[in-house]
Image (tube, rainbow, N blue to C red):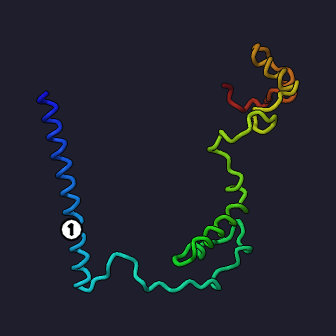
Amino acid sequence: MSNDADFLARWSRRKHDAATDKIKQAKQIETSNSTASETGLAPLEPSGNVLPFDPASLPAIESVGAESNIRAFLETGVPVDLARAALRRAWSLDPVIRDFVGLSENSWDFNAPGAMAGFGPIDGEEGGRLLTRLLGEPDTRAAALHPPVTTSDSSLPRV
C-alpha cells in the first residue's frame, strides 16, 4: 500500500512542477515581447504592412492548366477560395494527379473483369501456359516463338 502512496505523491509532484514550468515559460515570453517592443525591435507577429490583394495581377482561373505555374495564387493576401479554386483546376487537369489510385487499393473494383491487371478472365492460351508451368513440362509454344540462340563463332569463350 505504501508503494501506491509513494507513486501517487511523485505523480502529483511532477504534475505540479510541469504546470509551474509552463507558467514560468509563458511569463518569460510575455516579458521578452514587451522588452522587444520597448527596445524598438520588430515583434514576431506578421506586420500590418502587407500590400492589399490585387485580383488583376492574377491570371484567369480558366487559363490555369496542368503545367501552369500557380505560385501567384498561393501568395499571402490571396483569398483562400481563389487559391483553392486554382489548385482544384490544376489538379483536375493533370492526369497524373487526377487518375492516381496507387495507395488506395481498397478503391479498386476487384469484381469487374479487366479492371486491374491480373484480376480479369484468363483466356485459353494463358490457361495452357499456366498448366504447363505447373506440371513442369516444357512449353512448346514459347520455344517455337523464342528459339534458343546458337552461335557458330568459335572466338567466343565457352562457359
Residue linked to disc 1: 27
Q: Nearer the viewer, residue 88 or 23?
A: 23
Q: Position of residue 81 (x, y in %)?
A: 61, 71
Is 40 positioned to the left or the right of 134 in the image?
left
| Label 1 element class | helix
Kindly indicate the quadrant of the structure image that contains residue 157.
top right
Image coords of residue 43 (percent x, y): 32, 79
> Which residue: 14% across, 34% down?
5
Please say if 51 is above or below 148: below
Name the residue rendered at 65%, 45% in the picture. 102
> 31 left or right of 90?
left
Observer-nearest residue: 98 or 11? 11
**In which quadrant is the N terminus drawn?**
top left
Residue 121 lies left or right of residue 91; in this view the side is right
Q: Amino acid at mark 1?
A: Lys
The residue positioned 83% from the left and 26% from the top of the image is 126
Disc 1 crowd, CA 10 A, few/some/many (<14, 14-19, 20+): few
Q: Quadrant of residue 122?
A: top right
Residue name at image x 31 percent, y 82 percent: 42
Position of 84 relative to 20 (above/below): below
Q: Residue furthest toward the left?
A: 2
Residue 148 image point, x, y percent: 80, 26
Q: Percent x, y for residue 88?
A: 66, 64
